[in-house]
Image (cartoon, rainbow, N blue to C red):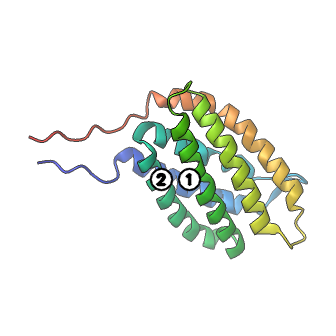
Amino acid sequence: MKIAHPFPGGMILAIAAMIVLVSASNYLVQFPVNDWLTWGALTYPATFLVTDLTNRAYGPKRARQVVYAGFALAVICSLWLASPRIALASGTAFLVAQLLDVSVFDRLRGTSWWKAPLASSALGSAVDTALFFTLAFAGTAVPFVTLALGDFAVKLALAFLFLSPFRLLMAVVRPIKPARPS
């Protein structure tokens, strides 16, 4: 009898992508592009694409597993790449926003193919932005409200832009069929 692996290959890839994207974003958020944007705003939105593809292929339970694993490992990596405050703010915002993304996506799963990823990414991005910038920078000299507005605008633009890769990758990302009993 063949035993199904708890983390199929696609999920391992999704977890690895989460770790890389969140860790890189936590490092890059420390470097402003200008007065209203950090480099982290350009990498982080791809986490919603990873979550949504996982949710589409494997369902909400597996998507939450990717979020939890990505959260735990990315926070550990981020402690080496960013300040503890940024790492903890990021972890908190990531966990809340990604779990919201999974729920919204699952609720809209049966609608037009683009509604679930767009709505879940937009709502998740709003929550993530508000939580992260408040927890990471409130009470500091960093102009976090301005940065949060710029960050959110980029996240929304990328949510629209990522619809094309989402649609293309839906055909590639296929769940591994469970082994049939012999």
CA distance for labels 1 and 2: 7 Å
Query: Is 150 on the left or on the right of 159, as rendered?
Result: right
Residue 58, given in percent of the width and then of the height, sits at 40, 41
Figure check: 77 above or below 12: below
Q: Secondary structure at mark 1?
A: helix
Callout 1 environment at 10 Å: few (<14), some (14 to 19), or many (20+)? some
For image coordinates 54% across by 53% down, the residue present is 18
Q: Do the residues bearing badges 1 and 2 touch, measured as CB atoms within 8 Å? A: yes
Quadrant of res 90 = bottom right
Residue 26, given in percent of the width and then of the height, sits at 68, 62
- Residue at label 2? 64
For image coordinates 61% across by 61% down, the residue present is 23
Figure check: 170 above or below 35: above
Q: Which mark is first along the chain, 2 or 1? A: 2
Residue 22, given in percent of the width and then of the height, sits at 61, 57
Question: Would residue 93 be seen by someone viewing this image from the given angle?
Answer: yes
Marker disc for residue 99: 1
Residue 1, given in percent of the width and then of the height, sits at 11, 48
Query: Is 5 on the left or on the right of 133, as rendered?
Result: left
Three-letter amino acid code at disc 1? Answer: Leu
Q: Of residues 110 and 166, which is closer to you in this image?
A: 110
For image coordinates 62% across by 41% down, the residue present is 120
